[in-house]
Image: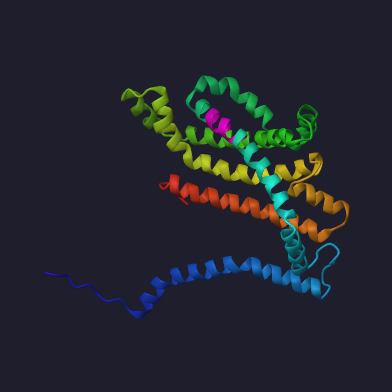
Amino acid sequence: MTTAHPSLSPDEIERLKAPARRERIYRIFSYFSPLLLLLLWEVAAQVALIDRRFFPPPSAIAGTAWQMIASLELFDHIGATLRRVWVGYAMGAIPGVLLGLILGLSAPARRVLGPIFAALYPVPKIAILPLILLIFGVGDASKFVVIAIGVFFLMFYNTLGGVMQIPQIYLDVARNAGATKFQTFRRVALPSALPSIFTGLKLAAGSSFIIIAAAEFLGARSGGVGFFIWASWQTFAVSRMFVGIVVISAMGYLTILALEALERHLVPWAKH
């Protein structure tokens, strides 16, 4: 025997469809809003509403970018910057996650080492770049180190926060079940902290590109997006300078998108 359900009126159907329709509209605007901004910028530059010496139209910037792509110059700079970011990022992220997990699980270690990290974290990473340059020179080693320092603290505190938010009952159950410290570390602490770890990874990715741009301004002899932004400023090649700004922004954005895709794969239970 089937139960009859009352049919919905046309008005009720429209109300149910409204949220999905609004979501499609928002998605369309999210796709086209950057293009609209570029169009407004182009028009404003062409009709002299803004000073083209400081804000060249996007068409001129695109032309400069194409020349740099055709000559392969842009790829050389991108390759140099990405190499420095990836190495420094790994150097800072791995120990940051490990120490965050260890201190999160160990109250004595947290009480002893926590104040040291709290005192060092507020020091601006670019402020110690001259010291790092003295120690490691102006080569890539100094870039690796300054990025690693910036990434380390973001990863450490995000991982520590993720572990500290684990309900105590989870750790008690693991202990009562006879889990070793390593098993608790691998099966309880790490999975529970993964959402916070990925938050740290995304924050650290953005910070890495900020840091490398500043480091390449001050301490790069040749090569790197930050280096050619600075060199363009010195010669007042504003279009080239904007190409560098757009490229470093795009690299950071694509890195965060890649991390979000990895997070959806590895942490499907987290809110996205």
Residue plotted at (55% across, 28% down): 99
Quadrant holding the N terminus = bottom left
Can you name the residue that lies furthest to the front here?
Answer: 71
Q: Decide if residue 124 is in sight here.
A: no
Q: Nearer the viewer, residue 57 or 68?
A: 68
Q: Position of residue 231 (x, y in %)?
A: 83, 50
On screen, 242 above or below 2? Answer: above
Q: Residue at x 61, y 37 (%)?
A: 154
- Colour scheme employed for the rendering of this structure: rainbow
The quarter holding residue 135 reads: top right
Residue 210: image location, x then y, percent = 70, 45
Residue appearing at x 38%, y 78% in the figure? 11
Instruction: Give the farthest residue toward the right.
Output: 235
Q: Is residue 169 left or right of residue 93?
A: left
Residue 238 within the segment the image draws in magenta: no
Magenta residues span 92-100
Q: Most prominent secondary structure in the magenta stretch?
A: helix
